């Protein structure tokens, strides 16, 4: 059995069917979140830098009044969101439709994370909201589909057993 067999895994997005033993675990998902979260954080930091060069005041309303969004938050929040989402996605590992569930739940969470940004008072400029919204969208684009793809390969019928041949 190999990549050319016509097993139930043929709906998998990976070109070679993964063995059941390769279903993602905590380590796999944490690593995937690390990679996607770091890239998302770095791109968000680049966007933040461009906004600062264009003199966009990156200030949001907090309990203490207007406060500038710190650069390290822009770098770390996408990573934290990716890790939390990836580990949470393990709850549906092996379920039928797991990839779609993770994709749509991740999308709803990403949209929900925009609500506080949209609800900022008028003292926060629209340009600031747009730049911060772009960072949220970048995180969604880089994290959610990848995590959903990995979890999707654990669905029933999307993997097969094969014997290990040595030498």
Image (cartoon, rainbow, N blue to C red):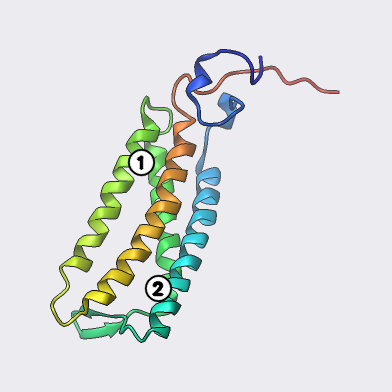
Q: Quadrant of the C terminus?
A: top right
Determine the secondary structure under disc 2.
helix
Q: Quadrant of the N terminus?
A: top right
Q: Which residue is mark 2?
A: 73
Q: Residue at x 42, y 62 (%)?
A: 78
Q: Residue at x 46, y 38 (%)?
A: 149
Q: Where residue 18 sits in the image (x, y, percent)?
A: 59, 27
Q: Where residue 141 sits in the image (x, y, percent)?
A: 41, 52
In the depicted structure, whether residue 50 falls above or below residue 4:
below
Which residue occupies the foreground of this view, 101 or 90? 101
Determine the secondary structure under disc 1.
helix
Mark 1 Cα-neighbour bin, 10 Å: few <14, some 14–19, many ≥20: many
In the depicted structure, whether residue 81 falls above or below residue 164:
below
Q: Where residue 134 sits in the image (x, y, percent)?
A: 34, 64
Give the mark nearest the N terminus, 1 or 2.
Answer: 2
Q: Which residue is mark 1?
A: 103
Q: Which mark lies nearer to you, 1 or 2?
A: 1
In the depicted structure, whether residue 75 falls above or below residue 160:
below
Mark 2 Cα-neighbour bin, 10 Å: few <14, some 14–19, many ≥20: some
């Amino acid at each position: 059995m190999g990549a050319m067999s016509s097993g139930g895994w043929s709906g998998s997005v990976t070109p070679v069917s993964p063995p059941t033993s390769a279903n993602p675990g905590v380590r796999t998902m944490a690593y995937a979140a690390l990679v996607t979260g770091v890239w998302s954080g770095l791109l968000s930091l680049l966007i933040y830098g461009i906004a600062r060069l264009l003199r966009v005041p990156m200030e949001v309303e907090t309990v203490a009044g207007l406060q500038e969004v710190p650069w390290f938050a822009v770098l770390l929040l996408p990573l934290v969101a990716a890790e939390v989402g990836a580990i949470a996605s393990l709850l549906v590992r092996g379920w039928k439709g797991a990839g779609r569930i993770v994709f749509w739940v991740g999308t709803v969470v990403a949209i929900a994370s925009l609500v506080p940004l949209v609800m900022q008072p008028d003292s926060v400029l629209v340009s600031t909201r747009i730049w911060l919204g772009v960072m949220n969208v970048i995180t969604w684009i880089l994290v959610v589909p990848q995590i959903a793809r990995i979890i999707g390969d654990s669905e029933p019928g999307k993997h097969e057993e094969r014997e290990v041949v040595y030498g």
